[in-house]
Image (cartoon, rainbow, N blue to C red):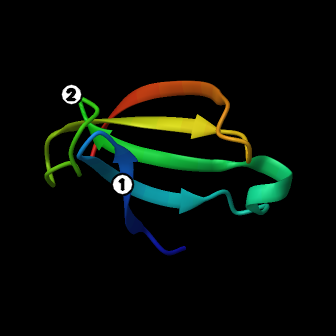
């Protein structure tokens, strides 16, 4: 699995990870800090968002990155 830094719009960025089943089948994940605007810092809380391939939000959860 490969994490990439991507722009999430408005000057914000996050880490992008395609779902292991493929983006077209199961979507992708975006990981940001708790503000939703920056790449998370190791050891800090972060948000993992799951989206469909057409960018529709499915669910999120807080994690320790």
Q: Residue lying at the far front in this picture: please name it.
A: 10
Q: Which residue is mark 2?
A: 35
Between disc 1 and disc 2, the foreground one is 1
Disc assigned to residue 22: none
Quarter assignment of residue 55: top right
Which residue occupies 78% across, 48% down? 26
**Depth order, front residue of 37/46:** 37
Which residue occupies 74% across, 58% down? 23
Residue 58 spot, x, y in % from top left:
65, 26
Q: How many marks?
A: 2
Quadrant (top left/top right/bottom left/bottom right) for the N terminus: bottom right
Which residue occupies 71% across, 48% down? 27
**Depth order, front residue of 44/32:** 32
Vertical position of residue 62 compared to residue 26: above or below: above
Vertical position of residue 43 compared to residue 47: above or below: below
Q: Is residue 2 left or right of residue 22?
A: left
Disc assigned to residue 7: 1
Vertical position of residue 56 compared to residue 32: above or below: above
Residue 59 spot, x, y in % from top left:
59, 24
Residue 12 spot, x, y in % from top left:
26, 44
Q: How many other residues sit within 10 Å of disc 2, few (<14), some (14-19) or many (≥20)? A: few
Residue 38 spot, x, y in % from top left:
21, 45
Please tell me which of labels 1 and 2 falls first in the chain: 1
As helix, strand or loop, the secondary structure at mark 1 comes to strand
Which residue occupies 67% across, 31% down? 56
Between the residue at mark 1 and the residue at mark 2, the CA separation in whole angstroms equals: 15 Å
As helix, strand or loop, the secondary structure at mark 2 comes to loop
Q: Is residue 14 left or right of residue 55?
A: left
């Amino acid at each position: 699995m490969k994490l990439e830094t991507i722009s999430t719009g408005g000057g914000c960025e996050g880490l992008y990870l395609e779902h292991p089943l493929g983006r077209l089948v199961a979507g992708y994940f975006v990981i940001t800090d708790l503000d939703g605007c920056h790449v998370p810092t190791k050891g800090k809380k972060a948000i993992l968002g799951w989206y469909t391939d057409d960018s529709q939000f499915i669910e999120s959860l807080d994690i320790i990155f």
